[in-house]
Amino acid sequence: MTAFLDQLRQIVGAAHVLTDGDLAAWEQDWRKRVQGKALAVVRPADTAQVAAVVKACAEARVALVPQGGNTGLSVGSTPDGSGTQIVLSLTRLNRVRHIDRDNLSFTVEAGCILQSLQETAEKHGLLFPLSLAAEGSCTIGGNLGTNAGGTQVVRYGNTRELCLGLEVVTPQGEVWDGLKGLRKDNTGYDLRDLFIGSEGTLGIITAATMKLFPQPAAQLTAWAAVPSMEAAVRLLGMAHQHLGAGLTGFEVMGQFALSLVAKHMPQLRVPFADQEDAPYCVLLENSDSESEAHARERFEHLLELAFEDGCVLDAVVAESLAQAHELWHIRESIPLAQAEEGLNIKHDISIAASRIPAFVAHTDALLQREIAGVRLVNFGHLGDGNLHYNVQAPADGDPKAFLREQEERVNHLVYEAVAAFGGSFSAEHGVGALKVDKLETYQSPVALSMMRAIKNALDPLGIMNPGVVLARG
């Protein structure tokens, strides 16, 4: 492999082919559940270098693992333990190539940090609405590769809906330029949508043209205590009816999830903590293009109706942008607080919003009956039917032992319930290597056959992120 590594050094520079020292930042997944071993970490600077690296890997039959910010939760960008795979880090591809204000779009490279893109849009008086907890370190290429969701899907859609075009390096090292930025283009198969969500198994996204939006004239945030999950869903329906497209965020949080935030981050003031008649809280956001007065009038009218209906027991409305940020920070701190509590079993599921109350009632009772003392950390994006339905060890139990002994059983119980309620076991985190067996179990044979046909046609050598999404065949 010495000659091969020398070839890579000639392409990207010796300083950007890493083989020695501590490579844990690239070889270990974000949750520290899997530790791989790479032949090398290769850091190209532009699309031409990416293409040359891929071509060299194809010729040498060396597998590639594309990686952005390495913040994924499904082990989709971690090398295996063989020491034969290349980690292709795209973080040096971090330029904003072009901003087109009239087209409400910008063209950005795959290694751009999501938060930096939000800030770039804001500097131009525009909005890039993709927002998620890892936005300070995740990259847009990874967001596209997993079709990330986040907190504003209810209004703006997943990353797929925000993308107007891609630039992709194929498994043969060729470059497809699909960066036209068109909102209408029916010239054959939609290749863009083929690569979005493919987790680097069909090609490497090197750049994208993404949608921008006008900044809202006003943005209001409220935190509401609700008596049940049914009430939360009823509030969602009322918000759709009275706020329309102004509804930009709708999150649900169980009181146990919030109690972990209060326990491990006491500096955060959690509204309505431990309110016995309110097992859930809802965080909702309303954006308005007209004026703050207009937005506040509609928002307050919605809350008045919700109080009358009984689906809201108490509520606070942020009086400033700083207060709104504090409320969102509480919501976004749940995963970290859960990690502080100990290892846990995570689920990223989606179910039609109308069926979520029945699913939660059924699955809560099932898990509590089957595993004594189990604690349920239920929160997520109720507005688009996506729950992070996580399971924590009993309070007096060993979290590591619980994960080791109960993970497969818990996953089976939860995913069987998800399937029974017509849902999906992977909503926004991707399949990765972690859930390949679940795809084999819960995806239809016809769909799997088509997926394998696409994989074999585009990547006949099987060098693109092998073992991710689809089982090695």
Image (cartoon, rainbow, N blue to C red):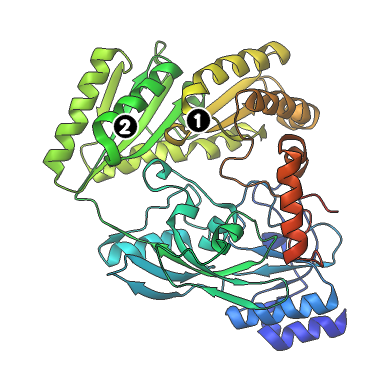
Instruction: Give the vertical position of 288 relative to 15 (above or below).
Output: above
Image quadrant where residue 27 sits: bottom right
Image quadrant where residue 211 sits: bottom left
Q: Position of residue 320 (x, y in %)?
A: 22, 42
Residue receiving disc 2:
240
In the picture, measured across the screen, residue 7 lies left or right of residue 257, that is right
Q: Position of residue 321 (x, y in %)?
A: 25, 45
Camera sees residue 225 = yes
| Residue depicted at 47% across the width and 22% down the height | 255
Q: At numbered mark 1, what does the secondary structure look like: helix, strand or loop?
A: strand
| Residue depicted at 28% across the width and 29% down the height | 241
Residue receiving disc 1:
379
> In the depicted view, which residue is nearer to us: 236 or 84?
236
Circle count: 2
Q: At numbered mark 2, what does the secondary structure look like: helix, strand or loop?
A: helix
* Residue type, mark 1 in image: Phe
| Residue depicted at 14% across the width and 33% down the height | 297
Which labelled disc corresponds to residue 202? none
In the picture, measured across the screen, residue 328 lies left or right of residue 460, that is left
| Residue depicted at 40% across the width and 40% down the height | 154
